[in-house]
Amino acid sequence: MEITLLVGIRNDEEKEKVINLNTTINLHFFKTSAQYPISNLLMQKSLGNLLRKLHITDKTLFHVRGEYMGIIFYKAFKNAFGYDPNLFMDIRGASYEEIAGYLKQGILTKIKLHYLKSLFEKYVSKAKLVNVVSEELKHYAMTKYGFSDQNIVINHCIAGDGFFWDETIRENIRRKLKVAASEILFVFSSSTGGKWQNGDEIAMALARQGYKILMLTKKSYSHENIISMFVPYNEVPNYLMAADIGIIIRDKDIVNKVSSPIKFSEYLSCGLPVIANDSVTLISDVLKKYNCGAIVDDLEQLDQNIINRLLSMDKARIANIGKQLFSIETIGDGYIKTYDRLASVK
């Protein structure tokens, strides 16, 4: 079976970055742009021109990430070939509500939301199969888009192969950070610093109580109990291993309720017990089922008994749970089964 990756890029610099990441998969590029009506038409045209150059048959499967790009792809394919593609649409979250709730509101955002609402209502259901990242997102997709249970599969967000537990790495990084073996070190990791992740609130709530927290973000903090760092992605696992407890505190809204945070997958895979609030259903369910963390209402009043319980947990056991639920092998196997299933859909 031949695998080809169709990559949307805005400029030659983005194209070079993608080429440098990969040496094994066939790459084809098309021009992408912002989510507005005119740019939509330009992107459809670029993608349609690319599709016409490829060797496509009625057996070809298409796995497209996100509702918006899935719709662009569907329309480009239908215009180019006159029939519906074997489309597997990968829905990663409540994207419309994320824009409405977290993007700066203005006339352009209102235009975008109006446009996306119309597109989603008309075209998302054109997918033959849909992937979602959580049970809650499955319910959301069934309710919002009318998919049946047979049309939806669940594959959570992956933790890469580099995320694992190693005692030696932990000790080396703690020495580098000058954190004593007896000190408790929390960690919060975010590459985007999205508002829904509440990084500032988490950092200050723990620091004010005398706890040390490692903030793996682009933002720098001046508090004596906060270690601010932003490291290359391949080094992130080393710093997660150095910590004792991972923190995820999210807003209680539909965007977070249906999500599968990548950081949660990565925390567990590195052996970290997790403290979270009851905002992400997937996290709450995993912490309760596998006894690998704690659910709290307020970081300002952390219970020392809870912390002591988490510190006593076996990190190797937690890392194994992470691998069992979120590894490339586990999620990859789920996707391969989905491709087989899509190939049999008439």
Image: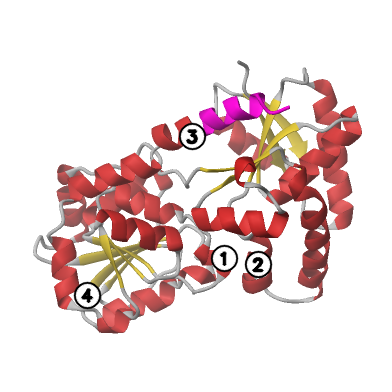
The one of 141 and 115 positioned closer to us in this rendering? 141
Q: Is residue 18 visible?
A: yes
The one of 106 and 323 positioned closer to us in this rendering? 323
Q: Amino acid at mark 1?
A: Val
Q: Which mark is residue 255?
A: 1
Q: Residue at x 14, y 74 (%)?
A: 305
Q: Assign a secondary structure to mark 2.
A: helix
Q: Residue at x 60, y 46 (%)?
A: 149
| Residue indicated by mark 2 | 97
| Residue indicated by mark 3 | 334
Left or right of 54: which side holds 18? left
First in sequence: mark 3 or mark 4? 4
Q: Residue at x 51, y 60 (%)?
A: 192
* Label 2 neighbour load within 10 Å: few <14, some 14-19, many 20+: some
Q: Which mark is residue 268?
A: none
First in sequence: mark 2 or mark 1? 2
Looking at the rendered image, the disc whose residue lies closer to the viewer, 3 or 1, is 3
Read off the magenta span.
Answer: 334-346
Left or right of 102: which side holds 214? left
